[in-house]
Image (cartoon, rainbow, N blue to C red):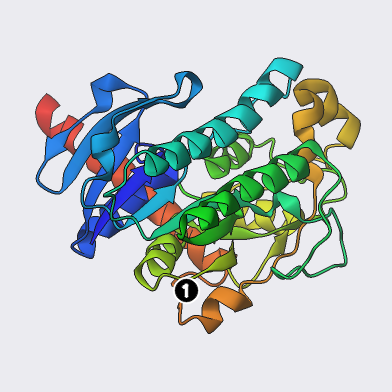
């Protein structure tokens, strides 16, 4: 099988490429950076610019499934102009892919698997959300996800099987939220946000990439939550990070107004509560490797420590 991946050089995309190769799948990928174009037998890059509607249509050659991860980061201050960037990056990339398929009569693509986000679910301390939930969170992110998924569903008009993976809080030491959450803990100023009772539906990056591969491999259709089986509260998350870093938590929780003053409307991400179910993807035969936050963080920080030790050893050997 050959897969076309957008966002392949990002945090999730890099892990996804690695797992596709482990499965023996060839990967084509699209990048806006011509300097990141690589040409190998099983890994071929192509240039595109969704903002200008530019794309190398050769990217579709012999491809059977498109995995779409493209979209500007939501972890930046939500100014009016950047809000437009967040939305346009998602809409324009899917729109360009759709138009390219329409203009390529002999393409072999049969399915689209698109990233989405659990931010579509309403903010709640008590609800437990499945993919059947129809209410959308009354926030900027909720509206973005709604438009994003509607755009992905347009591919059904082309006869493609369409699946959407609603991604939770991604656990990785290579980027994303975890290093930012761990940084204040490392320097003895870590603490929970607000009440700390808000639910955080997380997933280890390895399991998330495996979900995308699973959905693509079995041509699954519909919405799937990309979260681990056991969500935790923010207070529990911070506590487990501190435990792994062997740091105390001595400060009081950070009030909402402080973070909104620092981050603006983007601070909503720190206080939104979405407890989300992973049952549907498990019923499709997917087996998680990391089902609880203790195990996931232990593995991540252990590998992080081993990486640091390895670098130190190499440096010492060079000096000696």
* Relative vertical location of residue 106 with respect to residue 163 in this rendering, above or below: above
Left/right of residue 5 with respect to residue 126 in the rendered view: left
Q: Quadrant of residue 299?
A: bottom left
Which residue is located at x 26 percent, y 52 percent? 63
Residue 312 visible, this orientation: no
Residue nearer the viewer, 29 or 124 = 29
User: Is 46 in front, or is 181?
Assistant: 46
Q: Position of residue 276 (x, y in %)?
A: 70, 65
Q: Secondary structure at mark 1?
A: loop
Front in this rendered view, residue 3 or 237: 3
Q: Residues within 10 Å of mark 1 (few under 14, many from 20)?
A: many
* Rendering quarter of residue 251: top right
75, above or below 238, in the image: above
> If the image is split into quadrants, where does the N terminus sit?
bottom left
Q: Is residue 222 visible to the viewer in this orientation of the structure?
A: yes
Task: Describe residue 109's horizontal placement relative to residue 11 as left or right.
Answer: left
Residue at point 78%, 36% (across, down): 140
Q: Residue furthest front?
A: 105
The reply, left or right, for residue 138 in relation to residue 231 is: right
Task: Say how many tags the image has.
Answer: 1
Q: Quadrant of the C terminus?
A: top left
Residue denoted by label 1 = 288
- Which residue corresponds to the image point at 23% horizontal and 43% vertical from the top-left? 310
- In this orientation, which residue lies closer to the viewer: 134 or 213? 134
Q: Position of residue 264 (x, y in %)?
A: 80, 24
Asked which quadrant contains residue 289, the reply is: bottom left
The residue drawn where x is 29% and y is 50% is 107
Measured as percent of width and height from the top left, residue 311 is found at 24, 37
């Amino acid at each position: 099988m050959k897969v076309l991946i957008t966002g392949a050089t990002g945090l999730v995309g890099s892990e996804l490429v690695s797992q596709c190769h482990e499965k023996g799948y060839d990967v084509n990928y699209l990048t806006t950076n011509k300097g990141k174009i690589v040409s190998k037998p099983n890994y071929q890059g192509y240039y595109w610019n969704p903002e200008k509607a530019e794309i190398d249509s050769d990217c579709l050659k012999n491809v059977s499934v498109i995995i779409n991860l493209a979209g500007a980061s939501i972890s930046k201050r939500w100014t009016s102009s950047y809000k437009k960037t967040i939305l346009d990056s998602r809409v324009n990339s899917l729109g360009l892919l759709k138009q390219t398929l329409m203009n390529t009569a002999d393409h072999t693509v049969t399915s689209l698997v698109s990233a989405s986000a659990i931010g579509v679910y309403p903010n709640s301390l008590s609800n437990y959300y499945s993919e059947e939930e129809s209410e959308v969170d009354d926030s900027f992110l909720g509206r973005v996800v709604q438009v994003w998924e509607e755009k992905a569903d347009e591919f059904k008009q082309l006869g493609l099987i369409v699946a959407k993976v609603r991604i939770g809080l991604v656990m990785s030491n290579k980027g994303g939220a975890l290093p930012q959450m761990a940084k204040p803990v490392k320097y003895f100023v870590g603490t929970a946000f607000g009440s700390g009772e808000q639910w955080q539906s997380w997933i280890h990056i390895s399991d998330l990439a495996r979900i995308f591969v699973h959905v693509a491999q079995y041509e699954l259709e519909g919405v799937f939550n990309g979260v681990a089986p056991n969500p935790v509260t923010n207070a529990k998350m911070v506590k487990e990070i501190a435990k792994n870093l062997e740091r105390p938590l001595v400060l009081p929780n950070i009030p909402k107004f402080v973070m909104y003053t620092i981050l603006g409307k983007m601070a909503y991400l720190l206080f939104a509560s979405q407890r989300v179910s992973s049952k549907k993807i498990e019923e499709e035969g997917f087996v998680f490797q990391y089902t609880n936050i203790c195990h996931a963080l232990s593995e991540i920080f252990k590998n992080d420590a081993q990486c640091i030790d390895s670098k130190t050893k190499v440096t010492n050997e060079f000096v000696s």
